């Protein structure tokens, strides 16, 4: 979230922006695409970003997305195993 304030001092107007961000663990593909777009817009046309570097960044992000999906799947499996253990224990207690 970005909020801006305007101050007037001696006839001059200044604007400051306060930024409240998210943690690095909550960044997603949309954030990566925005960063990539801004990076491409701001690069020097006479000295563009190296293709190898860009592909490496994309590969790293793809790998990170895969790891995140794997973690989510493992969490689901752990929850199901916990439920199975609880059910099995309660069946033997009867």
Image (tube, grey):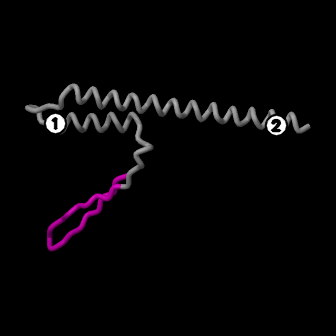
* For residue 81, side relative to residue 26 (left or right): right
* For residue 72, side relative to residue 49 (left or right): right
Q: Position of residue 86 (x, y in %)?
A: 77, 37
Residue lying furthest left in this view?
A: 46
Closer-to-camera residue (57/45): 57
Residue lying furthest right in this view?
A: 94
Q: Quadrant of residue 27?
A: top left
Q: Position of residue 62 (x, y in %)?
A: 38, 28
Q: Quadrant of residue 59?
A: top left
Closer-to-camera residue (28/87): 87
**Magenta span covers which residues?**
1-19
> Which residue is pictured at 59% across the width and 35% down the height?
75
Residue lying furthest bottom in this view?
A: 10
Magenta stretch containing residue 70, yes or no? Answer: no
For marks 1 and 2 on the same chain, the one whose residue lies earlier in the sequence: 1
Location of residue 5 with respect to 64 vertically, above or below: below
Location of residue 16 with respect to 94 vertically, above or below: below
Magenta stretch containing residue 7, yes or no? Answer: yes
Which residue in the protein does label 1 denote? 43
> Which residue is pictured at 73% across the width and 35% down the height?
83
Q: Position of residue 87 (x, y in %)?
A: 80, 34
Q: Position of residue 31 (x, y in %)?
A: 36, 38
- Indicate which label's residue lies in the foreground, 1 or 2: 2
Q: Residues within 10 Å of mark 1 (few under 14, many from 20)?
A: few
Which residue in the protein does label 2 denote? 89
């Amino acid at each position: 979230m970005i909020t801006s304030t305007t101050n007037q001092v001696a006839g001059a107007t200044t604007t400051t922006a306060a930024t409240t961000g998210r943690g690095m663990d909550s960044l997603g593909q949309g954030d990566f695409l925005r960063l990539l777009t801004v990076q491409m817009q701001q690069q020097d046309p006479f000295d563009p970003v190296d293709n190898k570097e860009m592909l490496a960044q994309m590969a790293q992000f793809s790998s990170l997305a895969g790891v995140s999906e794997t973690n989510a799947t493992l969490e689901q499996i752990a929850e199901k195993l916990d439920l199975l253990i609880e059910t099995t224990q309660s069946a033997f207690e009867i």
